[in-house]
Amino acid sequence: MALYDGMLLLAEIFVLFFQILYYICESIYKLFAPVEKKSVAGEIVLVTGAGHGIGKELAIGYALLGATVICWDINEEANQQTKNEIKKMGKDSVYAYRCDVTNREEVFKVAKKVKKEVGDVNILINNAGIGIFKTFLNYNDDEILRTINGNLIAHYWTLRAFLPSMIEKNHGHVVAVSSLLAIVMLMYATVYSSTKIAVRAFMESLNEELRISSKGKSLIKFTTVFPTVVFNGMLKKPIVKFPSLISPLLPKEVASLIIDAQRENCRERNIPSYLSPLLTILKNLPIKAQECLKDAFIGTITEPDD
């Protein structure tokens, strides 16, 4: 019996070794091979925070690709402006709803209205967020709660509203906009970074839940993106030590790269992507070495809001 168990274990290790080797080779191949982007024409895409910045550009980008776009924003006027701009481009399949994504009851109420008036959402883009950058003890309680609710808890409400229909149809894609500050810890982001790290963990855990519970048959995809500094007004006093290394991006550039990541079924993507190997090296260095590199090349990214 012991001999049989030992042989079975060796067989398992042998198979596992070749599986891992195969996926490593596949990953290397994908680094150089062009990736075919799936079509989003005819899909129903919901973008939170669509009234300005990255969210607005995401809504426009998906509309131009032939998707039906649903704009959600707490700012009703800005949201309507996004809708009107898309219509002026000759794209009529666009809808705008005022929604506070931190309010559970409001999310479910508006989601029900969306289902009735438009249909089931196939692609959910959780983009809305709040950026308040202060020294930890200078945050007030409301600022901490607003940041956590806007950057993290809102994802729970939108997914509880739209994921069931995706599971029922076994078709859908969820995109979460995290941040470079979920990977590299810097000053003035004790609350912001924590929420963005939690978003990454949430997306990974949810993907695992569906993968295992469906025995690998789930066709619902998850993509988490980590943009660097963006000129979207969130960082009120951005500081970029070496613009050639980490150049602030425009919302339109970031939105285009997010759409590409989603259409390529990418699980995670740093934006810009050239940061990936640099960040991998950074995170595997000794702590003191990481601190030296951050001091030398990154700095603080922003001045405090207070």
Image: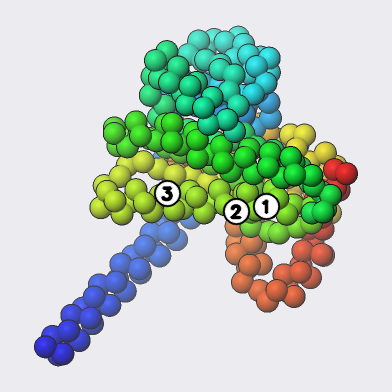
- Kind of residue indicated by mark 2: Ile
Q: Count residues near mark 2 (Cα–Cα under 10 Å), then give few for <14, some for 14-19, many for 20+.
A: some
Question: In this view of the protein, which residue sits in the foreground, 19 or 130?
Answer: 130
Q: What residue sits 48% from the left and 55% below the top?
A: 31
- SS of the residue under disc 2: helix
Sequence-first disc among 2 and 3: 2
Judged left or right of residue 251, residue 209 is left
Visible in this render: residue 2?
Answer: yes
Percent across and percent down for residue 129 are: 65, 37
Above or below residue 283? Residue 163 is above
- Spatial CA span between label 3 and label 1: 20 Å
Above or below residue 298? Residue 291 is below
Q: What residue sits 68% from the left and 38% below the top?
A: 146
Tags 1 and 2 touching, CB below 8 Å: yes
List the residue tagged with mark 2. Answer: 197
Q: Count residues near mark 1 (Cα–Cα under 10 Å), then give few for <14, some for 14-19, many for 20+.
A: many
Judged left or right of residue 161, residue 252 is right
